[in-house]
Amino acid sequence: MKKVISWLIRFVPRKYLQRVGGFGLKVVGLFYRGSAVTCPVCSTSYRTFLPYGRIKPRPNALCPQCLSLERHRLIWLYLQEKTAFFTAPLRVLHIAPEACFIPRFEKLHGDRYITGDIESPLAKVKMDIHAIPFPEKTFDAVLCNHVLEHVHDDIQAMREICRVLKPGGFSIMQVPLFAPMGDVTIEDTTITDPRERERLFGQDDHVRKYGRDYSRRIERAGLRAVEDNFVNTLSREKQKAYGLVPGEIIYTGFKP
Ligand SMILES: [Zn+2]
């Protein structure tokens, strides 16, 4: 059983896992019930989260109840503690929406919460991030996590995010950052061989690998970039209890 689960969560792409794996993992979760860790997204407690990751699974990563990973729990806490996301009625665009967030953000913001994606059936609006189908200054917040490493022109995509944000609005734009991190982002959209992409950019559907210049790229799109080491302001105990990765930076772009 354990082997089957570990195979399932390692090799089934996350978008399918979110659609079909949910029920099975909830059952698995019953065997992991405890009090050592708590998922802030779904408020469920376990003795540990499940391991997750394709090549080298990370321990204590996946919430069996809502399928949140470390980064989702971090974003949730960040939105809660450092923004008005949970307290003010906001117009929100959620690009490539993560399943663990959708029902909860819908409850918070109702019709003002819009999900968009080029292919995901989880999203309400079918859209290309290079040409977001909304007028300028529409949204208070844009969530766009683990998207920019896949798209043809990330600067154009971020310019579009900047365009649809209201002045003073913010966008959370997490991207995967692999160690060792280069000084400069490497990209080549002409490479289409999955193995070559995996070797160069870390995954078979990535077209670039971000470097330490990521914030400068955000600024090239007209946003003010902020790198927030929010997770390290939490105690070690809290980091452990929420299953967070110490040092994981939150990248935010603010519309001037
Ligand atoms: Zn959860």
Image (spheres, rainbow, N blue to C red):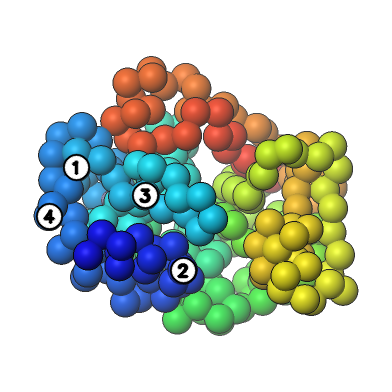
Tell me, yes or no, if residue 166 can be seen here.
Answer: no
Determine which residue is flagged by label 2: 11
Q: Residue at x 55, y 81 (%)?
A: 119
Q: CA distance from mark 1 to mark 3?
A: 13 Å
For the residue labelled by badge 2, is the local secondary structure a helix, a strand or a loop? helix
Q: CA distance from mark 4 to mark 2?
A: 22 Å
> Mark 3 or 4 closer to N-term?
4
- Which is more foreground, mark 1 or mark 3? 3
Determine which residue is flagged by label 1: 46
As drawn, the label of residue 30 is: 4
Q: Is residue 210 left or right of residue 20?
A: right
Callout 2: 10 Å neighbours few (<14), some, many (20+)?
few
Looking at the image, residue 57 lies above or below residue 163? above
Determine which residue is flagged by label 3: 51
Of 6 and 150, nearer the camera is 6
> Mark 2 or 3 closer to N-term?
2
Callout 4: 10 Å neighbours few (<14), some, many (20+)?
few
Find out whether the residues at labels 3 and 4 contact each other: C-beta distance under 8 Å.
no
Q: CA distance from mark 3 to mark 4?
A: 15 Å
For the residue labelled by badge 4, is the local secondary structure a helix, a strand or a loop? helix
Q: Amino acid at mark 1?
A: Tyr
Q: Residue at x 13, y 52 (%)?
A: 31
- Which is more foreground, mark 4 or mark 2? 2
Q: Amino acid at mark 4?
A: Leu
Q: Amino acid at mark 3?
A: Pro
Q: Position of residue 6 (x, y in %)?
A: 35, 60
- Which is more foreground, mark 3 or mark 4? 3
In which quadrant of the rendered view does residue 157 lie? bottom right
Q: Position of residue 197 (x, y in %)?
A: 75, 66
